[in-house]
Image: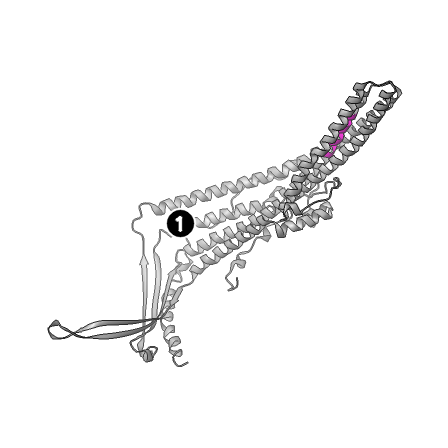
């Protein structure tokens, strides 16, 4: 212990002098060059054009909060959406990229503090001892023991480090928003694929039921042919209609299998080990509250990410501006040095030195000017990207509000068409049995009925798809308050 205590005694003196020197520049440290960040403006309409007659979000409305997919009331969809959160490999990669961005913030924050290095060395030197007349008579060996502690500290007088930290912190927040946007996109894609798959199940159920009806009609036609009432052509036409419908039913299996495989990838499962039981579409679009356009700027993670990248680009302008000013560096060295190991760490063998340096680039061939111009251009590009993202957000909300409104009107008319086609088939079939209508009349009305029923199912599927896309366009219950705060990037000493 007697050898260790002097080390602490000698190490305090240079640091006190160094801190005193740093205190002389403390007032300058408040100077941070470059523009302070102001959120860029974007043109925001007062209301959505398609909001007429639509439900407006209320402050306590929780319809789109947290697990938004639960508003569809489908237990299997709920289970699959939860698996996207934990098993989707794209999300795992995005989360790792966010952690990388946080580490870059901490890396930049390290420049706030001095760099201290310590080491120990032992050197033995053998050199000839020259006697009279320049003749080497013998040799001498010198052993040198050295224990230095070096400190170097570049003062952040002009705010270069602070602007770098500010830029990296904004980039990390943008990465967090990117993660939220990817999560929302993956879950929305899952819901779209799921409802499309259920739409195909409904189509197949319709085709199978229709094929059964066509099979019965073929039997009737064959019986009429056997009794000489119908022609061989009538039988062939009825059989053609039946086989065509059966082929259409089988053909749906290709698209359904592909959707099932796509869902498997979204939930992080191997396609050969994943299956979804068939069930026709039964869900209807839920009531989705939509707010005013200005709220969309806080609800969408992609808009938040774009805005944070503007902040990062703004801070980089300050970094470029700081290069025009001189760098001030403080340095200190202290330790022990002696030729005798026993006395190496004794107090009289201490040494120390303090120093300060100021360096300024006198000529760089326009490098700093080019870097500053580049930073301003990058900022302008990020502002444009932010405003474009806002415009895209408004477009997506309007698109899907319009889609839901128009599809609801279309479904109402399509339901009437289905009912009219059903009655037409019933009337024509009875006329055919009575001998007052031809088999071709029946087949034509049956084809019209099938087409209208398939169109009806397609409209219902499109409405579900538009509902999912509207929820996604509104941010899926996310808001900018979920971004990591500045305090969360503070260095705490933990990973």
Majority secondary structure of the magenta segment? helix
Query: Label 1 crowding class (10 Å Cα cut-off): few <14, some 14-19, many 20+?
Result: many
- Please, is residue 92 above or below residue 136 in the view? above
Which residue is at a point 62% across and 52% down the rendered structure image? 86
Say which of 177 and 428 sits in front: 428
- Specify how the rendered protein is coloured: one colour
Left or right: 155 in relation to 394: left
Residue 459: x, y in percent?
71, 34
Residue 283: x, y in percent?
74, 41
Residue placed under numbered mark 1 in the picture: 320
The part of the chain drawn in magenta is 446-457
- Please, is residue 177 above or below residue 470 in the view? below
Q: Quadrant of residue 258?
A: top right
Residue 457: x, y in percent?
74, 34
Q: Is residue 226 magenta?
A: no
Left or right: 234 in relation to 78: right
- Evaluate whether residue 182 shows in this view: yes
């Amino acid at each position: 212990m007697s050898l260790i205590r002097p080390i602490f005694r000698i190490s305090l003196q240079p640091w006190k002098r160094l801190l005193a020197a740093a205190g002389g520049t403390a007032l300058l440290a408040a100077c941070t060059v470059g523009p302070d960040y102001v959120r860029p403006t974007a043109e925001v309409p007062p209301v959505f054009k398609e909001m007429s007659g639509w439900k407006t979000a209320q402050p306590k409305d929780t319809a789109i909060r947290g697990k938004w997919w639960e508003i569809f009331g489908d237990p299997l969809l709920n289970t699959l959406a939860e698996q996207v959160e934990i098993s989707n490999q794209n999300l795992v990669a995005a989360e790792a990229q966010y952690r990388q961005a946080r580490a870059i913030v901490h890396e930049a924050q390290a420049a706030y503090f001095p760099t201290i290095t310590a080491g120990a060395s032992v050197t033995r030197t053998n050199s000839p001892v020259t006697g009279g007349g320049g003749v080497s008579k013998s040799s001498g060996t010198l052993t040198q023991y050295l224990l230095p502690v070096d400190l170097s500290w570049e003062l952040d007088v002009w705010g270069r480090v602070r602007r770098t930290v500010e830029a990296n912190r904004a980039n990390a927040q943008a990465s967090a928003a990117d993660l939220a946007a990817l999560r929302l996109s993956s879950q929305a894609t899952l819901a779209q694929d799921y409802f499309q798959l259920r739409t195909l199940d409904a189509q197949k159920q319709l085709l199978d039921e229709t094929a059964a009806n066509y099979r019965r009609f073929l039997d009737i036609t064959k019986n009429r042919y056997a009794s000489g009432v119908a022609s061989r052509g009538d039988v062939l036409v009825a059989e053609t209609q039946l086989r065509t419908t059966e082929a259409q039913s089988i053909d749906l299996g290709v698209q359904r299998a592909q959707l099932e495989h796509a869902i498997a990838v979204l939930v992080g499962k191997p396609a050969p080990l994943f299956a979804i039981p068939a069930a026709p579409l039964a869900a209807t679009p839920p009531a989705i509250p939509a707010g005013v356009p200005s709220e969309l700027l806080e609800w969408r993670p992609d808009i938040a990410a774009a805005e944070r990248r503007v902040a990062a680009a703004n801070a980089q302008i300050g970094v470029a501006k700081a290069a025009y000013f001189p760098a001030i560096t403080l340095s200190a060295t202290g330790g022990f040095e002696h030729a005798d190991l026993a006395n190496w760490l004794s107090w009289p063998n201490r040494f120390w030195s303090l120093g300060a340096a100021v360096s300024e680039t006198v000529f760089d061939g326009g490098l700093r000017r080019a870097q500053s111009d580049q930073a301003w251009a990058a900022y302008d590009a990020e502002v444009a990207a932010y405003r474009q993202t806002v415009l895209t957000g408004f477009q997506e909300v309007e698109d899907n509000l319009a889609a839901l409104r128009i599809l609801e009107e279309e479904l109402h008319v399509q339901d009437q068409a289905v009912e009219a086609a059903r009655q037409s088939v019933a009337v024509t079939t009875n006329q055919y049995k009575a001998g007052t209508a031809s088999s071709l009349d029946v087949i034509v009305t049956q084809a019209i009925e099938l087409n209208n029923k398939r169109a009806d199912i397609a409209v219902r599927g499109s409405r579900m798809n538009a509902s999912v896309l509207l929820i996604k366009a509104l941010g899926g219950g996310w808001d900018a308050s979920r971004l990591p705060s500045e305090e969360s990037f503070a260095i705490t000493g933990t990973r």
